[in-house]
C-alpha cells in the first residue's frame, strides 16, 4: 500500500496539474489515535488570499494508525508478529493485512448574509437546490453534493452565514498503485476546479439577476484587497 506521504503528494500534485488555485495545506495529528489528516484548501481563480466573500473548496482525507503501520512495515512484517512463516495466511493472497479504503472529503463553502426569517426560508432552499443542480450539470455520476447551512445567533436574530456543499469520494484499489491513484486524484481535482469556477460565475454579484431573487441577500462585502500570498508546500508532501 502507498504511504501517507506519497498519497498527500499525489493529491497536491494533481491539484496543481489541473489548475486548482491552492491557497494552503493543513496537516494534523491526533495524539490519542495517531490519525493523520491532510487538508488542501483552494480559492477561485485570481484570488491570492481568502476574503469575506470568497467561495472556497477543501479536499481532505484521514489516515489512521493501521494504515501507517501497513504502508510502512508491509503485510509480511505485520503478520510475522502473530504467526510463523509456515502458517497459511489469507493476507498473503490478498496482498494487504487491512482492507484499506481512503475517503476524500470534499467541501465547497459559500458565504452568505441572509436573515433567517420565514420569508427567506424559501430563498435559502432555492439557493441550496440551485447549487445541487449546478453540480449535477457538471458531473457524470450520481454523487451529488449535500448542503448544510451555518446559522449565527446575535442581537438581531438568526442569520445564515454560509452554505457548505459536501461530497465524498471513496478510493480502494488505487491505494496500492501510484499511476491509478494519480488518475483518481486528477479526476476529483478537476471536478473541484470546475465546480469552483461554476460557483463563482453563478453566485458572483455581477452574474446575479433580478430573477434569482437572492441578489440583495447573498455574498457579504469584502473588507480588504488581497495581500501578497506566501504558499508553503508541506514538508511531508
Image (cartoon, rainbow, N blue to C red):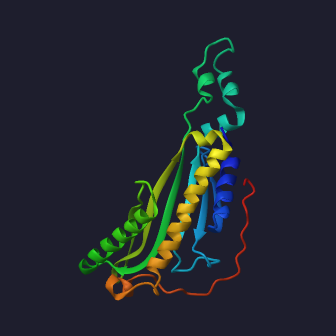
Please provide percent x and percent y for residue 16.
67, 63
Position of residue 181 in the picture relative to residue 231 (left or right) = left
Rendered residue at 64%/50% (across/down): 182
Does the rendering let one see residue 74? Answer: yes
Quadrant in which the C terminus appears: bottom right
Vertical side of 70 occupied by 58: above or below: below
Report the side of 158 relative to 61 (left or right).
left
13 or 82, which lies in front? 13
Please state if 159 lies on the left or on the right of 36 as rendered: left
**Which quarter of the rendered picture does the N terminus lie within?**
top right
Residue 235: x, y in percent?
Answer: 75, 56
Q: Is residue 230 above or below residue 80?
A: below
Find residue 11 and report its horizontal and vertical position in percent. 64, 55
Q: Is residue 60 left or right of residue 77?
A: left
Is 214 in front, or is 177? 177
**Residue found farthest to the front:** 140
Amino acid at each position: 500500500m502507498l504511504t501517507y506521504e506519497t498519497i498527500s503528494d499525489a493529491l497536491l500534485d494533481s491539484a496543481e496539474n489541473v489548475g486548482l488555485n491552492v491557497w494552503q495545506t493543513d496537516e494534523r495529528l491526533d495524539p490519542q489515535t495517531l490519525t493523520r489528516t491532510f487538508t488542501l484548501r483552494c480559492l477561485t481563480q485570481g484570488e491570492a488570499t481568502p476574503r469575506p466573500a470568497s467561495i472556497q473548496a477543501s479536499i481532505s482525507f484521514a489516515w489512521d494508525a493501521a494504515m501507517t503501520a501497513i504502508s510502512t512495515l508491509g503485510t509480511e512484517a505485520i503478520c510475522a508478529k502473530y504467526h510463523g512463516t509456515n502458517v497459511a495466511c489469507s493476507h498473503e493472497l490478498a496482498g494487504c493485512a487491512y482492507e484499506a479504503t481512503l475517503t476524500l472529503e470534499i467541501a465547497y463553502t459559500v458565504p452568505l448574509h441572509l436573515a433567517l426569517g420565514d420569508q427567506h426560508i424559501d430563498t435559502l432552499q432555492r439557493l441550496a437546490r440551485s447549487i445541487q443542480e449546478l453540480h449535477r450539470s457538471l458531473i457524470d455520476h450520481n454523487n451529488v453534493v449535500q448542503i448544510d447551512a451555518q446559522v449565527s445567533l446575535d442581537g438581531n436574530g438568526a442569520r445564515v452565514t454560509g452554505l457548505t456543499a459536501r461530497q465524498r469520494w471513496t478510493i480502494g484499489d488505487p491505494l496500492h498503485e501510484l499511476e491509478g491513484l494519480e488518475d483518481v486524484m486528477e479526476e476529483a481535482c478537476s471536478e473541484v476546479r470546475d465546480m469552483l469556477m461554476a460557483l463563482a460565475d453563478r453566485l458572483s454579484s455581477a452574474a446575479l439577476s433580478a430573477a434569482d431573487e437572492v441578489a440583495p441577500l447573498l455574498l457579504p462585502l469584502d473588507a480588504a484587497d488581497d495581500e501578497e500570498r506566501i504558499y508553503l508546500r508541506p514538508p511531508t508532501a
